[in-house]
Image: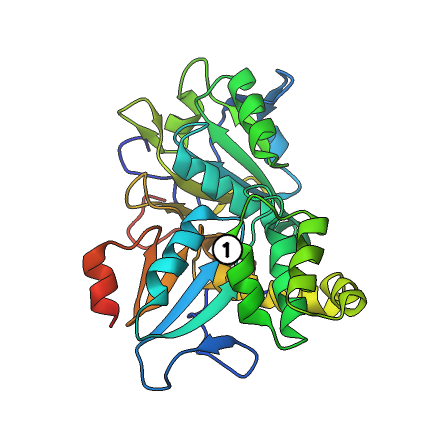
Amino acid sequence: MSELRSAPVPEPDAEDHLRGPAHAPLVIEYADFECPYCAALSARLAGRRLRRVFRHFPVRSNHPRAWAGACAAEAAGRQGRFWEMHELLFADQARLEDPHLWARARALGLDLDRFDAERRSEEVLARVRRDFESGVRAGVVTTPTVFAGGRSFTGQLDAETLAALG
Amino acid sequence: MTDGGVIQPGTPAPEFTLRRGGGEEFTRADLEGKTTVLVFYPFAFSPVCTDQLNLYDEVLSDFEAAGATLYGVSCDATYTQTAFREKLGVRIEQLSDFEPKGEACRAFGVYHPGGFPQRALVIVGPDAVVQWSYEAPSPGELPGANLIFDGLAAAAAPGAAAPAPGSPA
């Protein structure tokens, strides 16, 4: 039986995509690359001194290319370019079909055959699913959902909340 | 039951009639022999309901693996529910409580005076007895899928489906 019962949002571990100064306030984002609110939030968090963790929360019926985007970012990550792909995906959410993903991989100088094989692999699917399941268990319903300072926030964060994050 | 909030664990499911997508009846007898999750939601096409059903659809295979069948229930007409389901691209079957409006929702204790179901979840066991239920504190609050898996786990635990403390037997 599947294990999707309630559980606290996991602390960052070695598998997480994490960036920012070690002692900055921790912000965990559950997002998908086809979600315009996620892109907007990501841009608003970009200039702040935060320790940011990105976790995938793709929901197919909501955003048909969300899984493809998540797997593309993971495949780029296997060649050391996760954050670069993250930026390129959020920068142009109207272009998330396969040829658009290949174009991004080329622009980043990735080994294209490897990228294409890995983004379709069971390992990458499982990695995306790991993030998604941790979000479901923590009660995430929609994107973006952010965990920070022991609380969760859904949707756009107002200026006051953003300022309080650090 | 209508005044006391959502139907409580240990209570036999009431008699009711809902309509499936093709207009066929869905009654108490359809609950027997399997574990059913009734997802009551206020309105088709409202933004919050959309997110909720999208998420449940994403984990539908996990619900199946847990032996549970999900149905969405609202007071919208069958045609509206079908259009809603097609627009979302979700597989969860919809049941309509359109006429007499809200009668089944009243029987489950989830009818809002505003003319729509409260956002609520009810798990009914194969014996047609309610095993678990949940009512969102407000219609705008979305119950995560994790709550349903908690409910299924609680229902499967020994001694489940005993009346909740303080509830009428």
**Figure check: A166 above or below B5:** below
Residue that sits furthest to the top in the current view: B99
In front of the other: B20 or A114 = A114
Look at mark 1 in the image and give the residue it sits on.
Answer: A90
* The image quarter in which residue B5 lies: top left
Q: Is residue B12 visible?
A: no
Residue at the image point whose x is 42% and y is 34% from the top: B41
Residue at the image point whose x is 58% and y is 70% from the top: A82
Residue at the image point whose x is 74% and y is 66% from the top: A115
**Figure check: A4 above or below A95:** below
- Where is residue A45 shown, x and y percent of the image? 34, 64
In front of the other: A123 or B52 = A123
Tell me which chain the residue with mark 1 is part of: A
How packed is label 1: few (under 14 Cα within 10 Å), some, or many (20 or more)? many
Which kind of residue does numbered mark 1 sit on? Answer: Phe
Q: Is residue A49 visible?
A: yes
* Quarter of the rendering occupied by the C terminus of chain B: top left
In the displayed structure image, the side of residue B4 where residue B77 appears, left or right: right
Coloring scheme used: rainbow
- Where is residue B40 shown, x and y percent of the image? 44, 35
Residue that sits furthest to the bottom in the current view: A22
Number of numbered markers: 1
- Where is residue B132 shown, x and y percent of the image? 45, 49
- Where is residue B167 shown, x and y percent of the image? 31, 47
In front of the other: A56 or B111 = A56
Secondary structure beneath label 1: helix
**Figure check: B162 above or below B29:** below
Residue at the image point whose x is 45% and y is 55% from the top: B147
* Quarter of the rendering occupied by the N terminus of chain B: top left
